[in-house]
Image (cartoon, coloured by chain):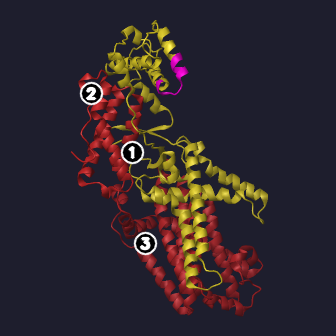
C-alpha cells in the first residue's frame, strides 16, 4: 500500500449499511480520494514529486473511479456523488490522456518537421499572398512614378519620416547608409514586436473571409512600391534594394506566410470542400496556427537583421549577398524533402 | 437512465466517450463565466503590465546614455509583447489547460474531438483574440483623424466577433471555431458526507416507513428533499416536513425534530427508489405511474 493510501477507516462494518448505494460508496471512496490527491499534485506540475508507485497507481484509481461512475449512474440516486465522480473522472481523463511531452520536445519537433510541413501545405496560399503583395508593389510603383503626390496618400506619415519626394537626393541617400547613433538593439526589438503583431493580426483577419488579409498584404506591398518609385526616380533603386532586402527577404517572406495563413482560414470558411465546414475550419486553423507561430520566430530574426545587420553593413553587394543567402536558406528549410507527416501517412 | 439521459440531451452538455467505453458528460461553460474569466485575466495582464512598466521606469537611470538603459528598454518591449501574445497561450498549454481566470471560474479548454489539446490549437485560438478584442477595443476609443462613422462601423464589425459565442449552440468564439476547441466547466468538487448515513441512524433508531408511505414520491422529489435538508432555511424544512406528514397521513412523532424526520424519510425513500431502479422500474416523479418508460435506456 502506498503512502497516499492510508488504511481504510471502517467506522461501520459495511454489512450493517442499509442502502446499497451507500455501501458501494463506502467501499470505493478511498480510491476516489487517492485519485483526487494524486491529480492535485500532478496538475500542479509536480509529477516529479510522485513516486514510481504513485505514477502506476494513477491509471488504476482512474479506472476504478470511471467504473464506479458508470455503476453509480444506474444504481445510485445520490445526485452529489454522481456529479462528484463525473467531475473527478473528466479531470483525470484530461490529465491521463493529455500530452505530457516537455516543452523542449515540442519545440524540437516543431522546428525539425512540423513547421516545414505546415508551410509546405500552404504553398498555394503562399503564392497567392505573394502575388497580392506584388500587385501592391506594382500598383504603387506605377502610381507614384506618374504622380509623386500619390506618395503622400500611400505612405503613413510616421513611416515616411524624412523620406518624402520633397527631400533632396543626398538626404535620401543618407537614409540608406545612416548607421544610426546607438540604440540598435532597441530599434531591432521594436521592429520585431511591431511586425510580429502585424503578422498575428493578418492571420486573425483571415477569419473575416480573407478579404482584410488580402487588403493588408496589398497595402504592405504598396508601401514598398511607393518607396521604390521614390528612390528609383533619383537613381537610387539599386541601393534601396540592398537596404530593403537584407532583412526584407526574411521579413517579407514571414509576412507573406502570415497572409497565406489568413487566406487559408478565410478560404476554408467560404469553401469548405468535402468536409463539414466546422471540421474544415479546424484543420485550416491548426495548420495556419503552426505557420504563424513560426512566423513570429522568423520576424525575430528579421528584426535582428534589420536592427543590427542593416545599420552596421553599408556595402550594397554585401547586403544583397546576405539577402540572397537568407532567401535560399528559408526556401531550403521550408521546401526540403521531409519524411511524410502523420496526417499524410494517415491519408494513404 | 432517464434522469441523466434527459440532462444530457439538454443543449449545453456534450458526451465524450473515453477509451474505456464510459461516456463522460461535459458541461459547456456559460458565456457569463467565460466573460468573467476573461475580465480576471485582462485585469491580471493590465496589473502585470503596470507593475512591469513601473519596475522598468525605476530601473532606468535618467540623463545617462548607459547601455543598461538600452537593455531595460529591450526587456520592456519584449516583455510587453510576450504578455500580450503569450499570456493565454502559455497558461493554456499547461496541464490544467486554463488561464488563472479560467481556473478561478472552474473552466478549462479541451479539444472538441476528445483527443489531446495541441499547442498549435492553443496558439491559433488565442491569436484570434487580436480581432475579437483588440479590433473592437481600438475602434471603441475614437482617435483624432478617424471619422466617427468609420469608428462606429469598425466597432460593429468588431462586435460581431466579440459576441459570437452568444450565437451558436456550442458557444464557440472565433478562436474556438478555428482551433477545434471547447471551453467546458471543470470544477473541483469535494465529496461531502452522505446524508443517507444520518437517515439510516434514525431508521435503525425506530422511525420507519411503509411501502405505501414511500410510494407517494419519485426521484425528482427526492432531489428536492435533499436540497431542502442541506439548505440553511429551517422554515422550509418545517414546511416540507408538514407537507410530507400530511401526504402520508402521519402525525407528528414526538421525540423527532423536523430534520431527523426528513433525513430518515430521505434515506428510506432513496432506498426504495434505488430498489426500483435496479429492477428497471424507475420513477421519475410523483406523477409518473412507474411503468417502464420507452425512453429509459
* Position in image of residue B289 (x %, y %): 43, 12
Residue drawn at (58%, 65%), measured in percent from left and top?
B51
* Mark 2–mark 3 distance (CA, rounded to whole Å): 68 Å
**Residue A182 in sight from this viewpoint:** yes
Q: In which quarter of the image is the N terminus of chain B?
A: top left
Quadrant in the rendering for residue A332: bottom left
Mark 2, secondary structure of its residue: loop
Name of the residue lying farthest toward the front: B255
Mark 3, secondary structure of its residue: helix
Residue drawn at (75%, 58%), measured in percent from left and top?
B150
* Mark 1–mark 2 distance (CA, rounded to whole Å): 30 Å
User: Which residue has dot 2 on it?
Assistant: A12
* Mark 3–mark 1 distance (CA, rounded to whole Å): 39 Å
Mark 1, secondary structure of its residue: helix
The residue segment tinted magenta is B229-239
Q: Quadrant of the C terminus of chain B?
A: top left
User: Which residue has dot 1 on it?
Assistant: A91
Point out which mark residue A181 bears.
Answer: none
Label 3 close to label 1 by CB (< 8 Å): no
* Position in image of residue B198 (x %, y %): 37, 23
Which residue is more in the foreground, A207 or B129? B129
**Dot placed on the residue nearer the N-terminal end, 1 or 2:** 2
Of tags 2 and 3, which is closer to the observer?
A: 2
The lab-note entry on whether marks 2 and 3 share a chain reads: yes
In terms of secondary structure, what is the magenta stretch mainly?
A: helix
Query: Is residue A251 rendered magenta in the image?
Result: no
Label 2 crowd bin: few (<14), some (14–19), many (20+), radius 10 Å: few
Vertical placement of residue A294 versus A276, above or below: below
**Dot placed on the residue nearer the N-terminal end, 2 or 3:** 2
Instruction: Tell me the red chain.
Output: A
Residue drawn at (49%, 84%), measured in percent from left and top?
A324
Which residue is more in the foreground, B253 or B184? B253
Amino acid at each position: 500500500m502506498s503512502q497516499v493510501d492510508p488504511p481504510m477507516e471502517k467506522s461501520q462494518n459495511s454489512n450493517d449499511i442499509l442502502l446499497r448505494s451507500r455501501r458501494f460508496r463506502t467501499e470505493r471512496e478511498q480510491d476516489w480520494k487517492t485519485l483526487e490527491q494524486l491529480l492535485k499534485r500532478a496538475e500542479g506540475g509536480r509529477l516529479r514529486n510522485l513516486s514510481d508507485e504513485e505514477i502506476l497507481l494513477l491509471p488504476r484509481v482512474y479506472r476504478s473511479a470511471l467504473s464506479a461512475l458508470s455503476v453509480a449512474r444506474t444504481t445510485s440516486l445520490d445526485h452529489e456523488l454522481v456529479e462528484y465522480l463525473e467531475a473527478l473522472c473528466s479531470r483525470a481523463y484530461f490529465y491521463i490522456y493529455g500530452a505530457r511531452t516537455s516543452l523542449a520536445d515540442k519545440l524540437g519537433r516543431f522546428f525539425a518537421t512540423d513547421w516545414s510541413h505546415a508551410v509546405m501545405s500552404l504553398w498555394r496560399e503562399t503564392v497567392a499572398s505573394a502575388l497580392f503583395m506584388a500587385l501592391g508593389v506594382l500598383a504603387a510603383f506605377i502610381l507614384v512614378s506618374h504622380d509623386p503626390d500619390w506618395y503622400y496618400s500611400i505612405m503613413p506619415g510616421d513611416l515616411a519620416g524624412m523620406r518624402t519626394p520633397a527631400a533632396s537626393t543626398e538626404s535620401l541617400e543618407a537614409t540608406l547608409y545612416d548607421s544610426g547613433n546607438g540604440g540598435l538593439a532597441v530599434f531591432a526589438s521594436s521592429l520585431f514586436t511591431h511586425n510580429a503583431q502585424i503578422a498575428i493580426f493578418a492571420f486573425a483577419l483571415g477569419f473575416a473571409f480573407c478579404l482584410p488579409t488580402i487588403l493588408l498584404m496589398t497595402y504592405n506591398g504598396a508601401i514598398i512600391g511607393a518607396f521604390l518609385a521614390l528612390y528609383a526616380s533619383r537613381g537610387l533603386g539599386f541601393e534601396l534594394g540592398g537596404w530593403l532586402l537584407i532583412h526584407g527577404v526574411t521579413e517579407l517572406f514571414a509576412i507573406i506566410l502570415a497572409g497565406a495563413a489568413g487566406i487559408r482560414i478565410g478560404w476554408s470558411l467560404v469553401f469548405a470542400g468535402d468536409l463539414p465546414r466546422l471540421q474544415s475550419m479546424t484543420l485550416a486553423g491548426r495548420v495556419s496556427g503552426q505557420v504563424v507561430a513560426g512566423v513570429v520566430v522568423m520576424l525575430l530574426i528579421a528584426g535582428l537583421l534589420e536592427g543590427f545587420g542593416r545599420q552596421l553593413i553599408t556595402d550594397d553587394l554585401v547586403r544583397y549577398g546576405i539577402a540572397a543567402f537568407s532567401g535560399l536558406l528559408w526556401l531550403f528549410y521550408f521546401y526540403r524533402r521531409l519524411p511524410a507527416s502523420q496526417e499524410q501517412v494517415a491519408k494513404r | 437512465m432517464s434522469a441523466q439521459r434527459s440532462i444530457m440531451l439538454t443543449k449545453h452538455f456534450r458526451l465524450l466517450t473515453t477509451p474505456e467505453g464510459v461516456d463522460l458528460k461535459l458541461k459547456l461553460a456559460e458565456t457569463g463565466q467565460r466573460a468573467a474569466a476573461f475580465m480576471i485575466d485582462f485585469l491580471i495582464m493590465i496589473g502585470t503590465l503596470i507593475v512591469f512598466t513601473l519596475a522598468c521606469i525605476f530601473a532606468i537611470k535618467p540623463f545617462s546614455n548607459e547601455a543598461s538603459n538600452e537593455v531595460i528598454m529591450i526587456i520592456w518591449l519584449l516583455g510587453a509583447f510576450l504578455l500580450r501574445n503569450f499570456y493565454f497561450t502559455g497558461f493554456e498549454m499547461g496541464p490544467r489547460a486554463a488561464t488563472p481566470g479560467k481556473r478561478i471560474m472552474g473552466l478549462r479548454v479541451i479539444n472538441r474531438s476528445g483527443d489531446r489539446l495541441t499547442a498549435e490549437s492553443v496558439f491559433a485560438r488565442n491569436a484570434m483574440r487580436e480581432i475579437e478584442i483588440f479590433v473592437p477595443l481600438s475602434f471603441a476609443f475614437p482617435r483624432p483623424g478617424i471619422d466617427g462613422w468609420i469608428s462606429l462601423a469598425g466597432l460593429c464589425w468588431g462586435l460581431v466577433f466579440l459576441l459570437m459565442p452568444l450565437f451558436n449552440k456550442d458557444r464557440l468564439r472565433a478562436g474556438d471555431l478555428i482551433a477545434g476547441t471547447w471551453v467546458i466547466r471543470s470544477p473541483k468538487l469535494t465529496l461531502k458526507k452522505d446524508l443517507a448515513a444520518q437517515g439510516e441512524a434514525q431508521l435503525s433508531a425506530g422511525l420507519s416507513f411503509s411501502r405505501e408511505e414511500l410510494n407517494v414520491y419519485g426521484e425528482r422529489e427526492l432531489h428536492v428533499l435533499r436540497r431542502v435538508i442541506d439548505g440553511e432555511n429551517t422554515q422550509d424544512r418545517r414546511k416540507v416536513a408538514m407537507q410530507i406528514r400530511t401526504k402520508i397521513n402521519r402525525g407528528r412523532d414526538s421525540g423527532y425534530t423536523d430534520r431527523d424526520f426528513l433525513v430518515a424519510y430521505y434515506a428510506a425513500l432513496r432506498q426504495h427508489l434505488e430498489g426500483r431502479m435496479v429492477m428497471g422500474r424507475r420513477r421519475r416523479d410523483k406523477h409518473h405511474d412507474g411503468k417502464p418508460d420507452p425512453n429509459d435506456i
